[in-house]
Image: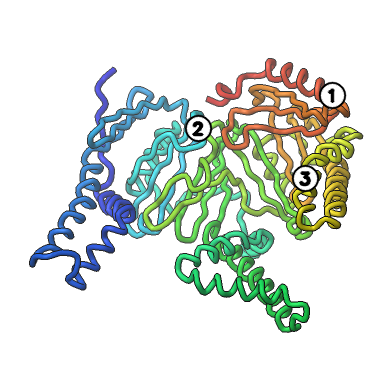
Amino acid sequence: MNNPIYHRIHTLTILIELSRVARQMLLAIIFVVYSLVTGSGGSGDFFGEGIAAIVGGLVLIPAVLRYLTFGYAVQDGNLYIKEGIVTKKQRTIPLDRIQNINLTRSWLHRILGLVDLDIETAVSAKAEARISALSEEDARVLRARLLGERPTHTSFVNEERAKDVVYKVTNKELFLAGASENKLGTIIGALLGLQIIGQRAIEKFVEDAVKAGRTPDMPQSNWLLWTVGIIIMLFIGWVFSIGSTFVKYYGFELVRDGDRLRRTYGMINHVENVLPTKRVQTMVFVENLLQRMLKICKVMVSTAGGFGGSDKQHTEPGGKVDVLPVLTPVLQIGAFPEIAQLIFPGKDLVGIARNPVGEKTVFRYIRSSILPSLIVAGGTAYFTRYWAIAIFFGLLGLATLNGFLHKKFAYWGDADGIWVSALGWLKRTKKFIPAEKVQAVIVRQSPAQRAFGLATVDMVSASPLFQNVEFDDVTTTDAKYLAEEAHRRSSDGRDSLVDGF
């Protein structure tokens, strides 16, 4: 093998690294600025200037050294990456093992005209390597070389060649997606964080609220205040959900490029993903109750490399770039068959013969809830002796209702070589896994399942994100069939880690 001839990343990468290191040393920078402005922090005429020089050096030197020590090369069918300031590291990635290549740009990247390349293999959900940062044209050409395509110099945003857009999300659909996924929990978490700033004010508010709650003749206005407060909180969470959805997925396009799908999106942080459809391990269809009423859903897919990695996988200058395995953040229900055909051509994923779960699944839910219900009721009996029995039977009633709903909505099926599992009723989830992608089959039984002849079957794929497709509370006869048939079909097909390379 010849020694690789390494290329350097873009010179403006120094500014990207400066931003990253500066964020990591934010507290030190604030201290320096405070010392310079107020003249405090130590004695001597040049104390503040000296501290500023030290902190500035700690910020600037790593940024410059990373630019000087990082290099990449494409040679002999491999991608070589060298990096490291103190500890040198060279990474070799065979080109035929690359699963996905994602392009990401934060707001700072967009100002500087730079792009980051995240390179995924089948090792994990995270990017195996990152090349940061290249010019837009160099990033396009390098990605084409790594994927075995013909390199072409095109603009990152305005490509001249015709695009086969298979789905483009409208502003109305983004609004519906955000409105149907209220992020009230995020708002509550932020408000709890305000304790750091106004802890005493919040404590006084809680004390007053508790005191008012214990007053028998509580004025009607207090109840009205609480009601209005809850409504305002729900409204804030609703608005935040809509706004964050627009910022994250604005301009979303799904483009067909041969046997690959490209998705581009982002208002502030721009992301572009490439999905080789032949390497898809699992596909997941998700809709909550409100989305079901609006006739919209979300579709996610994953490859052995994870298709984008985990949420908040890395921090970008100027903010976090969340890259989830979302194929479409929102999709009209009527368009699902067409999108499904792009992932699994020739397969009918709509007209599936539904096989129900076991008839005794309701009794399994009841038995599984007896011990937890006794523990909860026993704990409350110390404070509310007469309510303990009501709490116990109330929890059993909820478990019974949940069992009936699970029995009604859960099912499994076989769509011409695609295993299908449907679970949930408030949030309905359907998972699809091709038979040849099944790596292992696990059959497990809880004590309650053993008592009623039920079992849970897990079909394991090579995807680190949606690894298991779960068939819950099927009969032992169906569990045996699923396990044996999955083993037979997977042995007849090519292994998922080899198929498509």
- Tag 1 residue: 476
Identity of the amino acid at label 3? Gly
**Which label's residue is closer to the chain start, 3 or 1?**
3
In this rendering, which labeled residue sits more in front, label 2 or label 1? 1
Provide residue 436's location: percent of width, then percent of height.
Answer: 67, 23
Cα distance, mark 2 to mark 3?
A: 28 Å
Please name the residue shown 29% across and 50% down the image.
17
- Tag 3 residue: 424
- Tag 2 residue: 124
Identity of the amino acid at label 2? Ser
Does residue 209 appear in this view? yes
Disc 1 crowd, CA 10 A, few/some/many (<14, 14-19, 20+):
many
Please name the residue shown 74% across and 24% down the image.
443
Q: Which mark is residue 499?
A: none
> Left or right: where does residue 121 sit relative to residue 445?
left
> Left or right: where does residue 238 sit relative to residue 203?
right
The N terminus sits in image quarter = top left
Q: Is residue 13 above or below residue 125?
A: below
Provide residue 236's location: percent of width, then percent of height.
Answer: 61, 70
> Left or right: where does residue 358 sit relative to residue 306?
right
Please name the residue shown 54% across and 41% down the image.
257
Residue occupying the far left of the picture: 45
**Which label's residue is closer to the chain start, 2 or 1?**
2
Identity of the amino acid at label 1? Thr
**Which label's residue is closer to the chain start, 2 or 3?**
2
Q: Which is nearer the eye, 67 or 260?
A: 67
Cα distance, mark 3 to mark 1?
A: 21 Å
